[in-house]
Image (tube, helix red, strand yellow):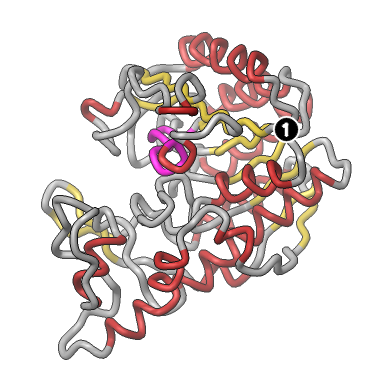
Amino acid sequence: MKAVFDARQWKHDPQNFMANGRSLRNPEQPERIRILTEGATRAGAEFIEPEDHGAGPIGAVHSPEYLTFLETIHTRWKRIEGSSDEVIPNIHPDNRGANYPKSAVGQAGYHQADTACPIAEGTWEAAYWSAQTALTAADLVLGGEKSAYALCRPPGHHAFADLAGGFCFLNNSAIAAEYFRKQGLRPAILDVDVHHGNGTQGIFYNRNDVLTVSLHADPDRFYPFFWGGRQERGKGLGEGYNLNIPLPRGTGDDDYLKALEPALARIDAFGADVVVIALGLDSHENDPLQGLSITTPGFARLGAAIATLNRPTLLVQEGGYLSEDLGHNIENFLKGFEGG
């Protein structure tokens, strides 16, 4: 399998993360890159560097206002006397249709949903090349590869059109799906991250030209809390084009694979001719965020099950955090997918 990665993605090194009122080290650490690269290479992945597709494909998903914010906010933030090294919001609007402030502090609150997406000096460059990684991997699929793996970091599926959150800034899976759509294809996004792909859902919620499907830990007691219920089916033209499958905490291999069946059936019913997999490995039983209980061999079974769709497939890396199992999980998934 061809794979894509750009070394500039190392430049995002977030330090801050707040959980249960405590300030902790951010779990979305650069070391993930080394572990994922080694695991994918053991599975036979051959890495290339991405090409620069420019701002156009990113701007097809994200607002220019938001992209300007991401590119400039760290420089503006550092002009504030006594500011921290990272942009972290401390106030949020109760109505995002209200005033759009000129203040860097106000805009941080407007464009950052939570404290899990701090913006430092290298964040924009890393996020930009993470998106270009997904686009180049999409080109491989468009060029005839049956599948390709995009090692995207920072991840993307919690990023809305104009809102960062949950370690995510640019929605790589959504950018790739829209890129496929503009090439005349009919894309479906299948999100298997432990967290609901709320940003992806939000981007396409009113549309019927991209199908969005997400399996995830039940958000009643798990991030992102406010999105991911079964009743969220799309709106307007998009009604019936969004499928959420929330799962009980601790769901393991057999029950997860059974829950996957209607997701695959929905993709078949949509008539997708290309599939984007938002590939979160944080559903593993030993992942630090502890939501579901997929085993390492279970990821091979998951990869094989997804392969039964028998469609050109782009694998976009989402979550999966530092543990002894992370590299083995990506290795098993890729081997299972290739074998399937």
Could you say where residue 256 lies in the image, as x and y percent from the top left?
48, 16
Circle 1: element type: strand
- Which residue is at a point 11% across and 52% down the rendered structure image? 21
Residue indicated by mark 1: 274
Is residue 113 toward the left or the right of residue 152 in the image? left
- Which residue is at a point 33% across and 18% down the rendered structure image? 231
The residues colored magenta run: 193-201
Residue 199 shown in magenta: yes
Q: Nearer the viewer, residue 54 or 78?
A: 54
Hey, what amino acid is under mark 1? Val
- Is the residue marked by circle 1 packed among few (<14), some (14-19), or many (20+) residues within 10 Å? many
- Which residue is at a point 68% across and 41% down the rendered structure image? 181
Residue most extreme to the left: 21
Q: Quadrant of the N terminus?
A: top right
Could you say where residue 63 lies in the image, as x and y percent from the top left?
45, 60
Location of residue 62 with respect to 128 vertically, above or below: above
Q: Quadrant of the C terminus?
A: top right
Residue 61 shown in magenta: no
- Which residue is at a point 87% across and 47% down the rendered structure image? 143
Residue most extreme to the right: 144
Q: Nearer the viewer, residue 67 or 298?
A: 67
